[in-house]
Image (tube, rainbow, N blue to C red):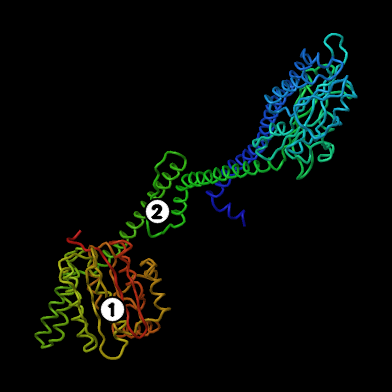
Amino acid sequence: MLHKWLTTSLQRKLSVVVAGSMIVPMLALGLFAFVISSNITEEKTKLTGSDMLKQMDANLRFMLEDIETLSIFLIGERDLQAYLAGPEDDEAKRTELVGRMTNLAASKPYIANIAIYPERFDARLSTATWYENELPEEAAKAIAGGRKTWSGVYEIRDYAGMEQVITLFRPIRSIYDFRRLGWLAISLDERELARNLESPEFGQGMGKVELVGGDGTILSSADRSRLGRPLDEYAPGLFALLPRRIPEGEDIGSEPLSASMNISGSVIFGEGDGKSTVLYRHEPLTGWMLVGSVPYDQYRAENRYILTLTAEVVGVSVLVCTLLIWFTVRRITRPLRVLTRHLSRIDPERPLPRFPATSDDEIGRLGHSYNMLGAHIEQLKREVIRGEARKKEADLRALQAQINPHFLYNTLSSIHWIALMSGERRIADMVEGLSDFLRISLNQGKDYCPVEQEVAHIRNYVRVQSIRFPDKFTVEYFVDETLNDKWMLKLLLQPLVENALIHGIQKREGIGTITIFIQPEGRRMHVTVMDDGLGMNAERLEEVRQSLLLPAADGEENGRPGISGTALAETAAMTVTDAPTPVPVALTGTAASTSATRVTASTAATTPAGWSAGYGLRNVNERLLLHYGQEAGLSIDSREGEGTQVSFSIPIMEESP
């Protein structure tokens, strides 16, 4: 079905081929753009996340370096060295030192507490009021280790409630003999760290960042329930995927980490709905890591938007391309469609329609050749028509040469006077009517006559036939007076009136009526001859209509056609006409043969037995077509038992051509 649909139209084939050659690459380009855009989106998210981690790391490093600097300042402070080197607690010095430490802690919002634990006596210097008087567990571990270290996150209760802190523990040694005098503890407020890690733009609000210690413990997070818990508890196997540049057992406090430890990157973790992109960044001062995760749902959301946008752009592009292709192909193939339509609707009776060849391309040259072919065919048709007309004219001239009109005039005049002298008035009137009928038919050898003269010709014919068939018919005339001086081809009405009389009226009972209408219709003259005779059935009517399509010469196959009744003078009148003589034709269906036989018997002296009734009607129709064109052909309508109507329409002519 599709193959047939394509192969029956050049426009469809071109449209499909051109559209396919454009739409397929466009779809491939759209898919490629979607894949590239999706990758770019992911890389952009990674780059943006890495930049945010870098900024967070910078803020974290500032805090850590500031605390490191503060710790160095405090352990080298002379008053603190003197206080710790003393044999016992000096309350005045302790109060003074706590005041200084409090001022330093207050200037740093991220410092939760500064505490000093003397080695030689039991006294603790602290800037915060914690409820626990005993040494914190993390502090005890650091003191037991004997080196500088950062603790994990742990919980402290103060007057404001529970507080999470991360503490730097550093031994205080004498600046003189390097012996240990005590411990310095600077606690970092985890809430300040978490505030630094919060960013609504990270992963477009769907990502989260956490601070993870070197052992995989979560040190800071927006989700406080995760503090102090192993990262693998929430993301099993993730910590093992993150590269570690700090060998186990290395003393972090002995020397700063190398710059090469400050590495960053990303890994893909998880599967299915739990799949995410994990960004990480090492903090070289402490060995901690900033770990940020962006769920793939965020990529899917952006990818759906990109896919929708790409689909809309490709769809609009495909639609525009389809319309442009359709318009272009239609414009290109339109001349071919016009030419195909002209060729498929060829009417043998009409000239080939002219093809508007407006271009010089192959289609234009094809159209020009088509026009030349049409002109050549039309020229050949005119030559054939002229040849047929000359042949008929030669035949009529040969027939007319056998009948001397002047001899007929003199003979009819003698018969007329002999009838008058003998008192035969009816014969005299009949011969006088026939003489006038013949004189008008001759029309001095002209083919055209005024409408008034053609009507007078009918009146003379009716005058003769009314004597022959008394009280059998009447004729009514409805002729527009404005048409009396207009010109028409002569001898068109008499054969139609004779046909109505002989084959319509005579077969019916009683008096019949023949009506003649000659009325103007715009710039044309409409002529109708109708009778109320027997009429024809549908089958016979169709046969008569089809007989009009046959050339009139077909009636001459068995010899020269005969001349019936009053058509004798009409035939003699055809001296210089271009068309054959009109003669009567049978129009009464199944009664045609019987009627023709009766009429022939009564007019045996003038009608040969070989006469074909359809010849005269075809002759009249052919004369109309030859002189006036296709629009002037005879139109026949009939109903059995009601009558027959024959009509034609010709242009109104102001003068004889």
Q: Which image quadrant for residue 601?
A: bottom left
Residue with the mark numbered 2: 352
* Residue 611 is at least partly visible in this image: no
* Residue 318 is at least partly visible in this image: yes
Q: Which image quadrant for residue 593?
A: bottom left
Disc with the residue nearer the chain's start (2 vs 1): 2
Residue with the mark numbered 1: 530
**Label 1 secondary element:** strand
Q: Are marks 2 and 1 in contact (CB under 8 Å)?
A: no
- How far across and how far down the image is residue 537, in percent? 40, 81
- How far across and how far down the image is residue 22, in percent? 58, 41
- How far across and how far down the image is residue 257, in percent? 80, 19
Count the marks: how many?
2
- How far across and how far down the image is residue 82, in percent? 81, 13
Q: Where the N terminus falls, by quadrant?
A: bottom right
Q: Which image quadrant for residue 283?
A: top right
Sort mark 2 into few (<14), some (14-19) or many (20+) by Cα contacts within 10 Å. Answer: some
Q: Where the C terminus falls, by quadrant?
A: bottom left
Q: CA distance from mark 2 to mark 1?
A: 36 Å
* Pick the front one: 614 or 168: 168
In the displayed structure, does residue 7 sit left or right of residue 351?
right
* Pick the front one: 565 or 400: 565
Q: Amino acid at mark 1?
A: Met
**Label 2 secondary element:** loop
* Pick the front one: 308 or 491: 308
